[in-house]
Image (cartoon, rainbow, N blue to C red):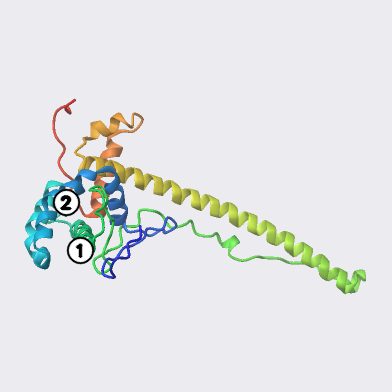
Amino acid sequence: MAVGHRKTLHLRAARPQDLRFDAWLDFLAVAAERAPAVWRDLYETVWPLWRKLPEIALITCEEPLREWAVRWHLLTAGGVPHPQAVYCAIENLSLRAWREQNGQPQPPPEYVIPTTGYAEVQRGDQVQPQALPVPRALQRVRFEGVWDVWRTGEPLAQARERLIREFTAALDRHITAYMQHAERAGYAVEAERRRWKQHLQWFCDYQLGGREVRELLDEQPDTEASKVRKALLEVARILNLRLRRGRKGRPKK
């Protein structure tokens, strides 16, 4: 999503081909889609004060932003509002203020810029694997041709053309083997990306949406509860978020 209203709004674009990724950018993008109530609450509770005192908004809104982070379990393992969540909130509030000052219509409450600051960003754990290493046999194109024109009397031009044909055939075989390797490596990476996205969706539904593991399992009948719980813990660790405690008893119908 490109927003170019001012240079101080830094956005990082998540490129699908990147093997190293910003876990928080992925999380915020999924959260914006699956938990819009988080952002509606931000605009209902923090935006009025931010709008009223724009000159000292960061000071006056420090406590409301903290309360917002607490309500939505956006706390670090140490129990403080996660700086990436607060940064995202501030950038979206700043965008609304800029739109209002310039007479532009406000986006809907669900509109969120998944953003991370260049200074604050820390690369997420490398959940996706690096592409499978190229086997040693594929690191060099090896070819050896026969040159015995002194014995066979083969014309030099004809021998040259023969060697080029043989080398081209050997090169084509090498390229085919390399592409097969790349396809296998790409499949492994894409499979891991799908796994990561699924885990983020579970985490957003649980952490922000208030759903319980048993409710998530209703949509994943072939998935074991231990797998979902392990995924929630893994995402919480990567994002450095404190996993909320699940509720006891049966969910309300």
Mark 1 vs mark 2: give the one in front.
Answer: 1
Mark drawn on residue 207: none
86 left or right, relative to 162: left
Q: Residue furthest top?
A: 253
Quarter of the image where one finds residue 37: top left
Query: Hey, what amino acid is under mark 2?
Result: Tyr
22 left or right, relative to 177: left
Number of numbered discs on residues: 2
- Residue bearing mark 2: 43
Question: Which quadrant: the N terminus?
Answer: bottom left
| Whether residue 147 can be seen here | no
Q: Residue at x 30, y 38 (%)?
A: 227
Query: Hey, what amino acid is under mark 1?
Result: Gln
Question: Which quadrant: the C terminus?
Answer: top left
The foreground one among 37 and 252 is 37
Task: Determine whether 131 is above or below 207 in the image.
Answer: below
Q: Position of residue 40 (x, y in %)?
A: 19, 47
- Residue bearing mark 1: 101
Task: Determine whether 52 is above or below 191 in the image.
Answer: below
| 10 Å crowding of disc 2: few (<14), some (14-19), many (20+) | some
Q: Position of residue 174 (x, y in %)?
A: 65, 59
